Amino acid sequence: MWRQGWPEDVEKLSSSDTQSRGTWAFVPEEIDKGTTRLILRERGGHKPRMRDVIFNYLFIERQHFIMERRMLKGIKERAEIAAADQDSKA
């Protein structure tokens, strides 16, 4: 799991410091032998203001979705290639 700005002592942070906390997790979930689903979870640690929601939707979310989708497809391709190589060696 990748974390950003999430210290152990959250209570000691000022309200401006808590705006940057959040997590980004890659969670592999085994479906059956030889099949795994990769779940991407992203969580922010603050309640956004309306202007932040609008700005995020208009300027960040679409590009972020494209980047994450390409990244996950790349991980899938590399995992499938590695699995095929491993099967051919066995």
Image (tube, helix red, strand yellow):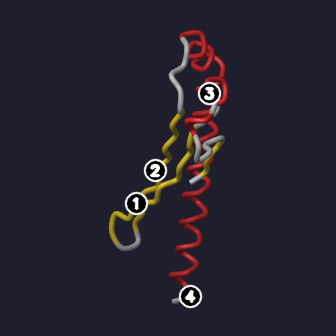
User: Mark 3 = which residue?
Assistant: 19
- Disc 2 marks a residue whose amino acid type is Ile
In the rendered structure, which amino acid carries the disc numbered 4? Answer: Lys
SS assignment at label 4: helix
Mark 4 touches mark 2? (CB < 8 Å): no
The N terminus, quarter of image = bottom right
Q: What is the secondary structure assignment of the residue under circle 1?
A: strand
**Quadrant of residue 24 within the rendered picture:** top right
- Kindly identify the amino acid type of the residue bearing the numbered disc 1: Glu
Q: Residue at x 59, y 57 (%)?
A: 75
Alpha-carbon span between mark 3 and mark 2:
25 Å
Question: In this figure, which residue is indicated by the disc labeled 2?
Answer: 39
Q: Are marks 3 and 1 in contact (CB under 8 Å)?
A: no
SS for tag 3?
loop
Kindly identify which residue carries mark 4: 89
- Circles 3 and 2, Cβ within 8 Å, touching? The answer is no
Foreground disc of the pair 3, 1: 3
Front-most of residues 21 and 14: 14
Splitting the image into 4 quarters, where does residue 15 fall?
top right
Specify the amino acid type for callout 3. Answer: Gln
Q: Nearer the viewer, mark 3 or mark 2?
A: 3
Dot 3, how many residues are within 10 Å of its Cα: few (below 14), some (14-19), or many (20+)?
A: some
CA separation, marks 4 and 2?
Answer: 29 Å
Nearer to us in this view, 16 or 1 = 16
First of labels 3, 1 by sequence position: 3
Q: Residue furthest top?
A: 51
> Which residue occupies 66% across, 19% down?
59
Sooner in the amino-acid sequence: mark 2 or mark 1:
1
Q: Which residue position is annotated with label 1?
A: 29
User: Dot 1 surroundings within 10 Å: few (below 14), some, or many (20 or more)?
Assistant: few
Place of residue 81 in the rendered image (x, y in percent of width and height, measured from the top left)? 58, 69
Q: Which mark is residue 6?
A: none
